[in-house]
Every structure is written in structure tokens, then in C-alpha cells.
Amino acid sequence: MKSLITRCSDINSQYCPCLLAETNHCVFCTKLQGMNTCECNWNGICIMYEKHWQEKMKNNIVSSVRPAYESSVLSKIQVGAQTYLFEILTDPILADKLNVIGSFVFLRRMNDIESFHFPVGVVKVVDNKISVIVEGIGAKSQRFLANIDDNLMVKGPYYNGILGKPWIDNIMDGKILLVAGGIGQAPALPIIKKLMENKNTITAIVAPGKVGNVFIGDLLEKNDVLLHTVTSLRKVGFPMLRDLLMENNDVIVSAGPDGQHSAIIRLMNEMGINIPMVATNNATMCCGEGICGSCHKLIEDNKIVKMCKVQTEYKTIMQD
């Protein structure tokens, strides 16, 4: 199996060089990590060159920091326990940049301070309207759901909501096995849309999880996904998954909590199966810029990666 190349999701975008480059903590450029030699193995535009060029042109460049846009709530529909689908009218420039899989934004109420920003994945973009699904599980999201009014702040775009995104972008006419549990159904939607556009065949096992509802079932069946709805992944879904893994699948997608990802990896290891894996990124995020440290994870080569920015194999992440 080919390995996924570890790469920054912001590289060579308008947000690169980012704030990390200012303090020699770039996640990709060795020179902007304080080293003496260039070892990036990158054939795109040189990040260090861009940084020095931008310093010369500071009065003419766009800031690398994502702005927050005042936006409007068009609709709020309950899809599960403490789980709501929002349609939000936002800036058309932002909406256009969010129309890729793995994109996410930070939300907060209009009058709340920056500390109340919390990340949520984008499930759909139509013109300048974005759809997100929010589950009230913590102080920030519960406050947001309890007190939301017609206006809110949307900060973005961010792009690393899916680990293994290149597998989804590049596979065509393949056979995909997808497992989605609870709120993991939300990020599964844009993944499925992209896979169907590339004429892939999808078999899905979906469980309601803590959300208490399989809210994507009808949509999957309309898109010719072979859907297996189960009451519990642990009791019913994983025995079914064991049988499905015996078939010749090209990619497996895990949309759900880290415990689900790890259980799938253990099962594949037990069965001696080694296929590319795509997983939802569940790291705790507070700033999205790689600065705060909340999303740091240790990977197998004893390196710390910033999960808000770095594309890496979920299998390489050392479990707590």
C-alpha cells in the first residue's frame, strides 16, 4: 500500500506562510523551523521565499490570519438529540473557499468573545449558503445552541477536517467501505458526495450513536449507497464489518470518534488487511492556526504534529 505524504493543508495557499513561519515553527519548511539546510522535498513555490518576499511587500499582501464574517442563520432543524442542522448565509468569498471536503469553520454568537469559537465541519455549500451540523456536547456548543439568535460569527476557511483526504480526492471507480457513527454522519456526507462524483461504489455501515438517529439514511439510499443501518457499531456493526473487509475494498472511511477509528485499525490488523484509511479529524482545536497547542498529537516517529494543519495517516498517531 502506498503511504500518505505528510503535508500541511495550508501549503501555498493565501494563508501560507502562516503565523508559525513568523517564529520558525513552520510545519513543513525546514529553514523556517530554524534548521540550516533545506530538506522539505517540495517542488511547489518555496515557502521561505514567499515569507521573505511578503515581508518586503507587507503593505500589499493579504493577512494570513483567517477573518471572522458576520453571518445569518437561515434555518435550524433538529436531526438528533442535542444535534441541529444549520443553514447559514455568509460571505460569498468564504463560502466558495469552503466548497471542498474536509473544510471547517469556527462559530460563535455575535456578542461572545473569541474564546467561545468552536470548530464545526461544513457538510454542504450552495452559492453563499453553508450547512453545518452542531452537536451540543461541551460548554461552547451547548451555549451556542441554547442562545443562538439570527446572527453569528463564522471564521474560516480551515481545511484539515479529514485525515487521508488525498485518498478521497484521487480514487476513481473504486470500492469504498464506509463506517459512520453518531455525529460522524455529518462529515460523511461531503466525503460520499465526492466519492460518488468519481464513480466509486460505496458500502456503508451507519449507527445512530449518541445522536440517537440515522439522519443521513434516506440521502445515502437516494445516491445508490449500499446502506446497512445498525443499532450499535460495537454489537452489530463490527461483526458485519469483519465480513465486508473480506471483500476487495480499495479504501475504508471511518467517520466518527477516535475510539471507532482505533477499533477499525485493530480489526484490520487482526485480519492482516492493509488498505488506505480515511478518518475524521477529532482533535481538540481552539485556534485553528497551530499556535495554541490544543491539537498537538504524537506520531510514530516521535514527532509532534499540529492536527489543525497537518495531513497524516491516522494509523501513525500514538494513542493516549
Image (spheres, rainbow, N blue to C red):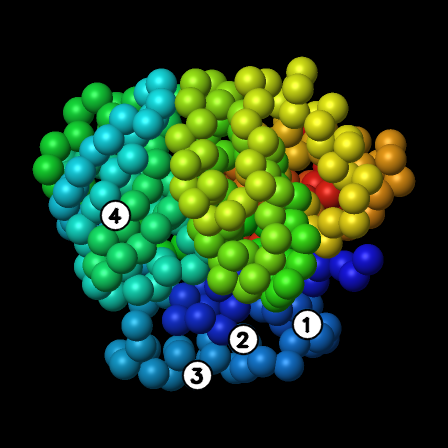
Residue that mark 2 sits on: 47
- Asked if disc 3 and disc 2 are in contact, CB closer than 8 Å, the reply is no
* Disc on the earlier residue, 4 or 3: 3
Depth check: give the residue in front, 123 or 116.
Answer: 123
* Left or right of 302 in this view: 311: left
Point out residue 162 in the picture as x, y percentages from the top left corner. Answer: 54, 49
Query: Given this view, does label 1 or label 4 mark the residue nearer the observer?
Result: 4
Query: Given this view, does label 3 or label 2 mark the residue nearer the observer?
Result: 2
**Disc 2, SS:** helix
* Disc on the earlier residue, 2 or 1: 1
Query: Given this view, does label 3 or label 1 mark the residue nearer the observer?
Result: 1
Amino acid found under the numbered disc labelled 4:
Val
Amino acid found under the numbered disc labelled 3:
Trp
Q: Residue at x 45, y 63 (%)?
A: 18
How far is the residue under mark 3 from the one under mark 1?
19 Å
Amino acid found under the numbered disc labelled 2:
Ile
- Asked if disc 4 and disc 3 are in contact, CB closer than 8 Å, the reply is no
How far is the residue under mark 1 from the one under mark 4?
33 Å
Residue 28 seen in the current view = no
Residue that mark 3 sits on: 53
Residue that mark 1 sits on: 40
Residue that mark 4 sits on: 154
Point out residue 100 in the picture as x, y percentages from the top left corner. Answer: 43, 60
**Disc 4, SS:** strand
Point out residue 286 in the picture as x, y percentages from the top left corner. Answer: 41, 39
How far is the residue under mark 2 from the one under mark 1?
10 Å
How far is the residue under mark 4 from the one under mark 2?
28 Å
Report the disc number at residue 31: none
Amino acid found under the numbered disc labelled 1:
Cys
